[in-house]
Image (spheres, rainbow, N blue to C red):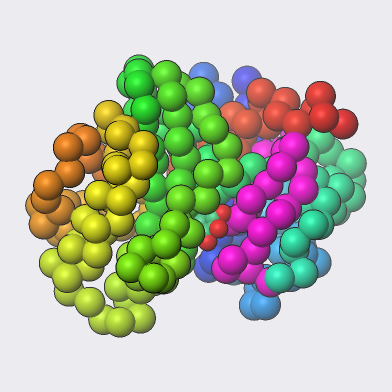
Amino acid sequence: MQIFGVDIGGSGIKGAPVDLDKGDLAAERFKVLTPHPATPDGVADGVQQVVEHFGWTGPVGLTFPGVVTGGATVRTAANVDKSWVDTDARALFADRLGGLPVTVVNDADAAGIAEMSFGAGKGRKGTVILLTFGTGIGSAVFTDGVLVPNTELGHLELHGHDAEKRASSKAKEDEDLSWEHWAHRVQKYLAHVEMLFSPELFIIGGGVSRKAAKFLPHVEGIRAEIVPAELQNNAGIVGAAMRAAQGEGKSEG
Ligand code: BGC
């Protein structure tokens, strides 16, 4: 079975049909640039281009970089245009896509869903936490494979700061930190999350997961196992499609 997945990120809107049995893209993905400011209308234009590129007419799952409730409503917008807050994103996208069935899910939750079924978290019991390090820090918390959605652990307070302002990969770039220096901040952040949740496993996602060898060796003193995500760039697309297949939010109307 195939469902279309779209990952709405800070720099690009990427999508492809997803083969749900394999947990992989069924065709090469297509990407358009995310407009700036990333307003609802501008992003919806991009989503429409990506979906129409494939002539897709079935269900669509989309990620969003903020809290999303009921598979539909955006509640926070830390790194996108503030006009998203309280937008019915499902209605917006469904309208642009000619009434196709649409499900919207937090980006880190989507990545986590994909990693738990097809990647680094496959078959893992207990508490597993996926953290994505990018423009912000996203989180997905699982206990025995079940997701607690919208955990937003990137906004924990760390030494008086919003944690993602200190430890995201954007913070590394903006402050021109060495891998070692940044790893030290990541370590403090992981220690804080570990104190709160005592997970068995941390999965490190986002673009930096490809560079894990550069910073993970500098992260010390964490009891939990720490591994890089395996699906990397496609985790959001795959997870969004999986969420749409589960019919998330339908019962809530
Ligand atoms: C947002 C999260 C999102 C994360 C990664 C944070 O700023 O609040 O909802 O998952 O960035 O995009």
Residue 34: % across, % down: 61, 68
Q: Residue, x 11% and y 50% (percent of image)?
A: 220
Q: Determine the residue located farthest toward the bottom in the rendered image.
A: 175
Is residue 57 visible in this depiction of the protein?
no
**Direction from residue 110 to residue 94 in the image, left or right:** right
Q: Residue, x 80% and y 67% (percent of image)?
A: 41
The answer to if 40 sits in the magenta stretch is no
Place residue 149 in its image quadrant: top right
Of 82 and 195, nearer the camera is 195
Q: Work out whether 6 lies above or below 179.
A: above
Residue 131: % across, % down: 39, 47
Place residue 84 in its image quadrant: bottom right
Q: Residue, x 29% and y 42% (percent of image)?
A: 194
Residue 120: % across, % down: 31, 31
The overriding secondary structure of the stretch rendered in magenta is loop
Span colored in magenta: 57-81
Of 219 and 221, nearer the camera is 221
